[in-house]
Image (tube, helix red, strand yellow):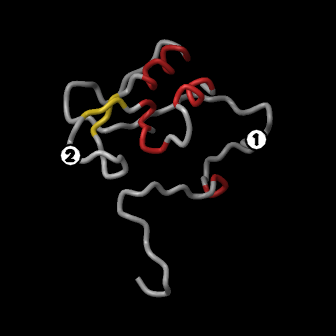
Amino acid sequence: KGGGRFAPPPNSPFSPPAENCPILDDSWEDPAGVKVDAILFGGRRPEGVPLVSEAFDWKHGVFQGAALKSEATAAAEFKGKAVMHDPFSMRPFFGYNFGDYLKHW
C-alpha cells in the first residue's frame, strides 16, 4: 500500500540476484560451467511418497523430475488440493512448451 506500488501476492515467486548468494561459485558465469553436485525439486504432497529420493544417475534424475506430481498451490491456476502432474515442480511457471524445456536437460 502507499506510493502507488502493490506488494506481490503471498505465494508469488521471489528471485533475488544470484550475486547476493554468499556461497555462489566464483566461476558461476564461466561458459564452461561449474560442477553440479545435486539438483533438488520441491513439490507438495500430503502423503504416499518419500520427501527425499536419490536418483541413480543423471538420466534417472531427469526422469524423476519430469514425472513429479504435486499438490496444487496458489501459484497454480487450479484451486483445491488436487494432486497434479507437475514436472520439475515448475508447471505453473513454464513459459514455453514443456517438450522444448525438457530438451535442455
Residue in front for this viewpoint, 41 or 84:
84
Q: Split into 4 quadrants, where in the image is the N terminus?
A: bottom left
Residue at far right of view = 31
Residue beneath label 1, please?
27
Residue beneath label 2, please?
80
Dot 2 amino acid type: Gly
Q: Pinpoint residue 88: horizontal percent, then vertical percent.
A: 45, 32
Vertical relation: 17 (above or below) 69: below
Disc 1/disc 2 C-alpha distance (Å): 43 Å
Residue in front for this viewpoint, 25 or 16:
16
Q: Pinpoint residue 6: horizontal percent, then vertical percent.
A: 44, 75
Query: How packed is label 1: few (under 14 Cα within 10 Å), some, or many (20 or more)?
Result: few
Vertical relation: 19 (above or below) 36: below
Vertical relation: 92 (above or below) 60: below
The residue under the point 36% across, 57% down is: 11
Is 36 on the left or on the right of 32, as rendered? left
The first of marks 1 and 2 along the sequence is 1
Q: Secondary structure at mark 1?
A: loop
Query: How packed is label 2: few (under 14 Cα within 10 Å), some, or many (20 or more)?
Result: few
Residue at far bottom of view = 3
Residue in front for this viewpoint, 48 or 95:
95
The residue under the point 61% across, 47% down is: 23
The residue under the point 35% across, 29% down is: 85
Residue in front for this viewpoint, 68 or 28:
68
Q: Quadrant of residue 70?
A: top left
Dot 1 amino acid type: Ser
Q: Pinpoint residue 43: horizontal percent, then vertical percent.
A: 35, 37
Q: Secondary structure at mark 2?
A: loop
Vertical relation: 47 (above or below) 90: above
